[in-house]
């Protein structure tokens, strides 16, 4: 089953210093942190903050290319989690045909925020994400898990 989730913000993992995109369902019952690279986090942050770069960035180019070719991103699906790696795909409609394109979740999220396409997450991913190994130290893992579970939207660095 797929659940619609929304980008609630970006923050820095206090353990690894890596950016995290925080997804949350509409009711605020489920939260999914996805660790991303700094470049992708910057692309998401610029869009969250409505900062228009002087020249199109890669995700802006993809959006423009898609639109100019008569296509539209209908949704992003975060479909799997294997060995601590999230998998996603883009569902694109072109001339009445639906295409599924493999994508890194970070790129899919950066594109979805530009096109206003919904983000759906497989419930199996949400269940498996609870046990994701993000650090090698058990104490740090437990501290990070407690911290993520206690997050309030006001704690997030960038908010929508």
Image (spheres, rainbow, N blue to C red):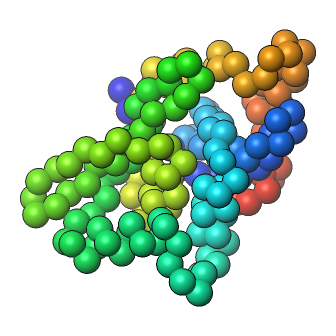
Residue under the image location 47 percent in, 65 percent down: 59
Q: Using the rendered view, name the quadrant where residue 79 is placed.
A: top left
- Would you place residue 128 above or below residue 160 in this image? above
Q: Quadrant of residue 41?
A: bottom right
- Residue 64 visible from this viewpoint: yes
Q: Is residue 27 left or right of residue 158?
A: left
Front-lying residue, 91 or 68: 68
Q: Is residue 148 left or right of residue 42?
A: right
Q: Residue furthest top?
A: 138
Residue lying at 66% horizontally and 48% vertically, measured from the top left: 37
Q: Considering only vertical position in the picture, is 150 above or below 145?
A: below
In the rendered view of the protein, which quadrant contains the C terminus?
Answer: bottom right
Q: Does residue 9 appear in this view?
A: no
- Judging depth in this view, the residue of 116 and 39 nearest the camera is 39
Residue 33: percent from left, percent from top:
65, 37
User: What residue is at 59 percent from the left and 23 percent from the top?
Assistant: 84
């Amino acid at each position: 089953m797929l659940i619609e989730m929304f980008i609630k913000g970006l923050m820095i993992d206090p353990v690894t210093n890596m950016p995290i995109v925080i997804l949350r369902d509409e009711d605020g019952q489920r939260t999914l942190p996805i660790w991303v690279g700094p470049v992708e986090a910057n692309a998401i942050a610029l869009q969250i903050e409505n900062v228009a770069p002087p020249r199109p960035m890669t995700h802006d180019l993809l959006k423009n290319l898609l639109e100019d070719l008569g296509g539209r991103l209908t949704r992003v699906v975060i479909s799997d989690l294997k060995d601590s790696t999230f998998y996603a795909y883009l569902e694109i409609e072109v001339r009445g045909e639906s295409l599924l394109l493999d994508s890194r979740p970070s790129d899919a999220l950066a594109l979805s925020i530009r096109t206003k396409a919904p983000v759906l997450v497989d419930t199996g991913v949400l269940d498996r994400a609870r046990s994701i190994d993000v650090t090698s130290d058990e104490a740090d893992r437990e501290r990070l898990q407690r911290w993520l579970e206690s997050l309030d939207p006001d704690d997030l660095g960038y908010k929508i």
